[in-house]
Amino acid sequence: MKDPYEVLGLSRGASKEEVKSVYRKLAKKYHPDMNENNPLQDLAEEKFKEIQWAYDEIMNVSSSGSYSSSYSYSDNSNQNSSSSLFNIRQLIQTGRFNEAVRVLNGVKIRNAEWNYLMGVCYVNMGSIGQGMQFVQNAVRMEPNNFEYKNFLSQILNMQQTYQNRAYNYNRSSSSVDCCTQLICADCLCECLGGDLISCC
């Protein structure tokens, strides 16, 4: 379990005023309204939630007068894993999918987010079937996670579109129809960060 003081970058003896001051500064920086046009909006929102949790945790404990010692020896492998997954999301946002897969393979905790990120990488590298298996694992592990379910839905829609195009292509020999299908396939790839036809 993460230490809320570490999340806010504070020492354990920080006063309530220090906690409030740092919280306001970080909350303003990572608030979703301040990151609407940011390509890393998802990461900022995740960080904002973590900051909110840490602040609530510290303030609740301060009012009750006792603090659980379970935070004093946080699980480093879990913390490293969380920060690694955060870094992997940044690699994915910048299109460095091979590097993201390499880092993911070094992460010991294979939770739902790990499966989701691995799936995103494989789909964007063109291995849609393999990527879909990872995303399905993520959805099975966290069935209420909208991000995972939404991406799985996109993959399934993309596969259905490909199947429909292939079926229609077999029924028609028109060269115009073939070009249209290639352009549609390129658009689908670009939606997921890839590029089937580099000149378009």
Image: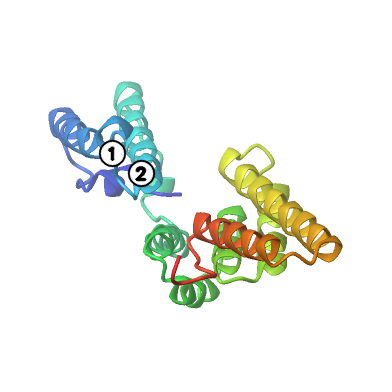
Q: Which residue is mark 2?
A: 41
- How many C-alpha atoms fall within 10 Å of the one at disc 2: few (<14), some, or many (≥20)? some
* Image side of residue 152 versus residue 189, left or right: right
Q: Which residue is mark 1?
A: 35
- Quadrant hosting residue 38: top left
Residue 110 in view here = no
Q: Nearer the viewer, residue 77 or 143?
A: 143
Q: Is residue 176 above or below residue 44?
A: below
- Considering only order in the chain, which callout, 2 or 1, is on the residue closer to the N terminus? 1
* Image side of residue 171 versus residue 182, left or right: right
Residue at figure coordinates x 31%, y 21% from the top left:
63
Percent x, y of residue 103: 46, 74
Residue at figure coordinates x 33%, y 34% from the top left:
32
Residue 49 in view here = yes
Three-letter residue code for mark 2: Gln
| The C terminus: image quadrant | bottom left
